[in-house]
Image (tube, grey):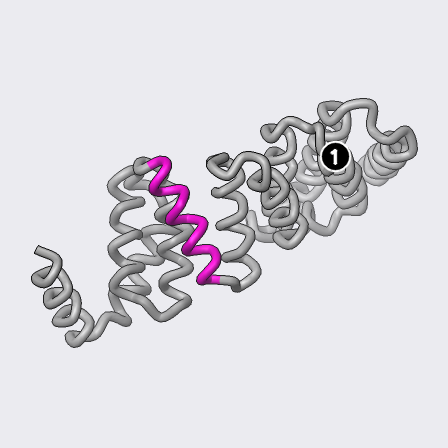
């Protein structure tokens, strides 16, 4: 009952912030964080896995309402990019990649080299199954920041699901070189290695020789 009461409370707060057009982006995002924390605490009482907790957070009405308010607050033109990308990251976490992509594209329209926006957009496009675009965004991010683990991880996944297994393995290795505990990169590497054919290795060797 307490958990239900708190969810209603935060949903009401989110609606109040929305009606007041969110006095500030910080206030709107604070409401979202509070709602998310409450949803997670409630979910962990009965959930049997982290996946169930994540699913519960994504579906929680207060979280959805609060994040909607935060998204509306940062959609304005004069909002700092950092605030907009903070919400974009949250949208990706609750499986709303299309809305996240819209915010990050808004940021990149003004700041083409914004690393947070490139990262969020590449992840959002990967989630949407737009692998070519995800690869392009992740490549731009890697060019701007060669030590960006997320860029190689997202590009590795996108390459894998594009059928480019050898390149996916190479990017997964790059991510692991930056963080050996990157479970997603490790899983991608293992999947890619099972798909690589001898012909792929020969073609790669030929390409390397031609480039030398």
Residue 135 higher or lower than 50, as above or below = below
Q: Can residue 5 be seen from the camera position used here?
A: no
Q: Residue 3 location in percent, x, y?
A: 80, 37
Q: Which residue is mark 1?
A: 76
The residue depicted at 73 percent of the width and 38 percent of the height is 75
Q: Is residue 183 left or right of residue 196?
A: right
Task: Choose top left, top right, bottom left or bottom right for residue 13.
Answer: top right
Q: Secondary structure at mark 1?
A: loop
Residue 184 higher or lower than 106, as above or below = below
Q: Residue 77 location in percent, x, y?
A: 71, 33
Q: Main secondary structure of the magenta part?
A: helix
Residue 25 higher or lower than 8, as above or below = above
Q: Is residue 98 magenta?
A: no
Q: Residue 148 location in percent, x, y?
A: 36, 38
Q: Looking at the figure, which quarter contains the C terminus?
A: bottom left
Q: Can residue 11 be seen from the camera position used here?
A: yes
Q: Is residue 204 left or right of residue 128?
A: left
Q: Residue 155 location in percent, x, y?
A: 38, 53
The residue depicted at 20 percent of the width and 71 percent of the height is 200
The residue depicted at 55 percent of the width and 52 percent of the height is 124
Label 1 neighbour load within 10 Å: few <14, some 14-19, many 20+: few
Task: Choose top left, top right, bottom left or bottom right for residue 10.
Answer: top right
Q: Looking at the figure, which quarter contains the N terminus?
A: top right
Q: Is residue 12 left or right of residue 119?
A: right
Q: Which stretch is magenta?
A: 131-145
Q: Is residue 101 left or right of residue 167?
A: right
């Amino acid at each position: 009952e307490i958990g239900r009461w708190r969810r209603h409370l935060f949903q009401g707060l989110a609606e109040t912030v929305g009606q007041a057009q969110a006095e500030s982006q910080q206030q709107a995002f604070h409401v979202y964080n509070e709602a998310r924390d409450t949803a997670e605490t409630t979910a962990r009482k009965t959930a049997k896995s982290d996946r169930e907790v994540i699913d519960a957070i994504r579906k929680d009405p207060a979280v959805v309402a609060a994040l909607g308010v935060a998204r509306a607050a940062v959609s304005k033109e004069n909002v700092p990019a950092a605030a907009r990308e903070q919400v974009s990251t949250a949208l990706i976490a609750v499986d709303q990649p299309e809305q996240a992509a819209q915010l990050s594209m808004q940021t990149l329209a003004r700041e083409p080299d914004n690393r947070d926006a490139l990262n969020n957009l590449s992840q959002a496009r990967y989630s949407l199954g737009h692998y070519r675009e995800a690869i392009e965004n992740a490549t731009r991010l890697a060019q701007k920041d060669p030590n960006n683990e997320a860029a190689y991880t997202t590009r590795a996944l996108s390459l894998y699901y594009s059928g480019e297994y050898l390149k996916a393995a190479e990017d997964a290795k790059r991510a692991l070189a930056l963080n050996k505990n990157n479970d997603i990169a490790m899983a991608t590497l293992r999947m890619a290695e099972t798909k690589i054919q001898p012909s792929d290795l020969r073609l790669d060797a030929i390409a390397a020789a031609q480039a030398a």
